[in-house]
Amino acid sequence: MTDLYFDVIILGGGPAGLSAALYCARGELNTAIIDTNMLGGQPSNYLELENYPGFKRIGGYELMEKFEEHADMFNVQKFSMQEILSVDLISNPKVIKTKEHVFSASSVIIATGAKPMKLGVNGEIEFAGRGVSYCAVCDGAFYKDKIVAVVGGGNSAVEEAIYLTQFVKKVYLVHRRDELRADKIIQERAFKNNKIEFVWDSVVQKINGKDLVESLSIKNVKTNDSYELSVDGIFPYIGIVPNVEFFNGQIEQDSKGFIITNNTMETSINGVYAIGDVRNTPLRQVVTAASDGAVAGVYASKYVQALHEVKI
Ligand code: NAP
């Protein structure tokens, strides 16, 4: 194990983290970014974005490569594929232990993002990777000419249902209400797509099969009717939960676990910031994640400079 000290450590290398890294390093802070995976975050799995300003259409992976190249320009130290053992945000300096290193920093920016929420029904864990998938871009091609279900009514569910139609014979979009939550423009595209059949007011109660998924037990919540829907795969897109396992108990969080910040992105702990999807925010987009990163980068720099001045 090696001991490494930085002015600021950013946990998470998605758009929020990479943007914060750029602002911190450009502000001449000795900056490191740590990720448990490769850098790039969730957007690396998005086929295409058409709402990141300046790019009418750009692949998610390509955009994240540009973010990383930009951070590289200011010599951000990158530590990917790190297995985090513990995070102490209360101590000064803050300490992050991974399997390979002990990192210390005056300031920490949390940009750990969020992961898909589970349906919590029988069969979901058993058939993971055998018909249950949380990533249409990763697994869609395996379902060529098959029948799949997408669960949820938000932007993710509707966008991914549309995406899947290029491979599959049919997509059932199973939603618990009779109205979608997704943006109107995305709804319109789904309504026009004749491979998508909407299963309104319905929830999945069980995922059934032998080796692979074969059907779903569906219940109509208005009529209480239950029946089996034959499918080869199911893609739950019912929202996200924050990646906060290492911070619970140290930091103020809302009832769903998202980290609460003020408008400089500072958390309940001085010198600790939270940005992007992990934070209690009204909008989760690449552009808002990048914006959070800029704000946190600037205020973390001010915080570290003030600490240095006190020491002098
Ligand atoms: P979301 O907006 O929270 O939508 C979750 C959907 O799942 C809702 O329709 C919800 O139903 C349904 N749901 C929740 N719990 C359920 C359960 N236990 N059983 C069945 N259905 C359940 O989540 P998201 O679509 O993953 O999006 C997350 C964030 O990322 C959002 O802020 C979204 O706008 C953003 N996003 C943006 C884009 C884009 O702009 N291109 C793309 C993807 C995601 P109700 O509607 O009844 O609550």
Image (tube, rainbow, N blue to C red):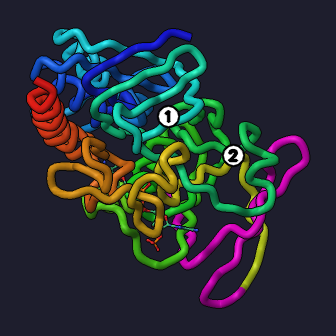
Determine which of the numbered discs, if any, sits on residue 132 in the image: 2
- At horizontal 42% and vertical 36% (from top left) the residue drawn is 42
Magenta span includes 117: no
Q: Is residue 225 above or below residue 32?
A: below
| CA separation in Å, label 1 and label 2 | 13 Å
Image coords of residue 66 (percent x, y): 24, 18
Quarter-wise, where is residue 211 in the image? top right
Residue lying farthest to the front in this orientation: 312
Q: Which residue is mark 1?
A: 137
Marked residue nearer the N-terminal end (1 or 2) = 2
Q: Residues within 10 Å of mark 1 (few under 14, many from 20)?
A: some
- Can residue 183 be seen? yes
Q: Amino acid at mark 1?
A: Val
In front of the other: 310 or 27: 310
Q: Which residues are magenta?
A: 196-224
In front of the other: 139 or 10: 10
Magenta span includes 216: yes
Helix, strand or loop for disc 2: loop
Q: Residues within 10 Å of mark 2 (few under 14, many from 20)?
A: many
Q: Is residue 294 above or below residue 247?
A: above
Image coords of residue 219 (percent x, y): 70, 77
- At horizontal 57% and vertical 65% (from top left) the residue drawn is 174
Ligand 1 falls in quadrant: bottom left
Determine which of the numbered discs, if any, sits on residue 201 in the image: none
Residue lying farthest to the bottom in this orientation: 223
